[in-house]
Image: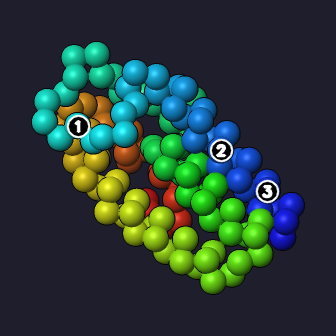
Amino acid sequence: ATWLGLAGMVFGEIFRKGALIQAGHNFTHQISDGQKRQEHELVTHGLYSISRHPGYLGWFWWSTSSQVLLSNPVSLVLFSAAAWRFFHERIPYEEAHLQRFFPAYREYKRRVPTRIPFIP
């Protein structure tokens, strides 16, 4: 379990950091629910061609894998549930604004899954 947890954490960290680097100035921690920033572009290449939300996917794997590494089954279930709930609520809100800002987002969403379990 230790190696599996460590591998999941490394995967998650690389995926999350890679997504932040690829998004560049298009990434912010706050969802823009007002006006689209003039320089904001829709990123659909690289890791974003694998997952619509590669930063979230990386964080999900990192956080749950940390509990596998620690061999903590109770926290694994709790971390997984808390992370899933957070993303289950945040992603639809964020995507509503992305669809408003970028007409091409609807097709991108249809084509590219989140890859977070049970969040299409």
- Neighbour class for label 2 at 10 Å: few (<14), some, many (≥20)? many
Q: Label 3 amino acid?
A: Leu
Occupied quadrant, residue 6? bottom right
Quadrant containing the C terminus in the rendered view: bottom left
Q: Please indicate whether residue 33 sits to the left or right of residue 53 in the image.
A: left
Query: At 40% across and 59% down in the image, what residue appears?
Result: 87
Element carrying mark 1: loop
The number of callouts visible is 3
Q: Dot 2 lies on which element?
A: helix
In the picture as drawn, the residue positioned furthest to the bottom comes out as 74
Query: Quick one: label 3, few (<14), some, or many (20+) residues within 10 Å?
Result: some
Residue corresponding to mark 3: 6
Residue at the spot x=77%, y=75% of the render?
A: 71
The amino acid type of the residue labelled 1 equals Ser
Which mark is first along the chain, 2 or 3?
Answer: 3
Residue 102: image quadrant is top left
Q: Is residue 47 visible?
A: no
Give the labeled residue for mark 2: 13
Residue holding disc 1: 32
Of residues 50 and 58, the one drawn nearer to the viewer in this rendering: 58
Quarter of the image where one finds residue 19 = top right
Q: Position of residue 38 (x, y in %)?
A: 22, 17
- Marks 3 and 2, Cα distance to the nearest angstrom? 10 Å
Please say if 58 is above or below 24.
below
Whole-angstrom CA distance, mark 1 to mark 3, is 34 Å
Q: Is residue 60 above or below residue 37?
A: below
